[in-house]
Amino acid sequence: MVLKEQIIKDLDSIVNLQLLNQLFEYIQIIKKTAITLPNNRNKVLAFAGIIDEAEANELKQTITQEFNHIEGEW
């Protein structure tokens, strides 16, 4: 079952009218927010393919070496 179908199924099981009204208001807020948020997908995709696989692996290895350990006491 996909997420949307599960949400619809869950909504169908709610009989409390007050709760349904609250959910409706919340959904309206989410819709407004989704419309007004800027989409930076194209900006991110502009960087796709800039480095080749060898460079990406080297970068990944460097990040792992530098940031995958804790120095000092915790």
Image (tube, rainbow, N blue to C red):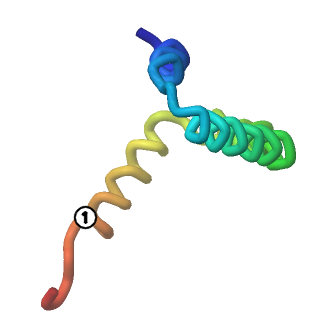
State the residue in front, 66 or 39: 39
Q: Vertically, is 26 above or below 65?
A: above
- Report whether 55 appears left or right of 51: left
Q: Is residue 52 left or right of residue 39?
A: left
Percent coordinates x, y for residue 43 in the rendering: 78, 44
How many numbered marks appear? 1
Q: Position of residue 62 (x, y in %)?
A: 36, 60
Of helix, strand and loop, which one carries label 1? Answer: loop
Type of residue at label 1?
Asn
Q: Residue at x 63, y 43 (%)?
A: 22
User: Where 27 falls versus 6 (above or below)?
Assistant: below
Quick one: label 1, few (<14), some, or many (20+) residues within 10 Å? few
Residue 55 location (% of width, % of height): 48, 44
Image-quadrant location for residue 51: top right
**Residue that lies at the very extreme toward the bottom in this rendered image:** 73
Q: Which residue, given by chain and number where applicable, does mark 1 sit on?
A: 68
- The answer to which of 54 and 11 lies nearer the viewer is 11
Residue at far top of view: 1
> Which quadrant holds the C terminus?
bottom left
Question: Residue at point 16% right, 89% down?
Answer: 72
Q: Is residue 17 above or below residue 61?
A: above
- The quadrant of the rendering that contains the N terminus is top left
Q: Residue at x 69, y 36 (%)?
A: 24
Q: Is residue 11 left or right of residue 70?
A: right
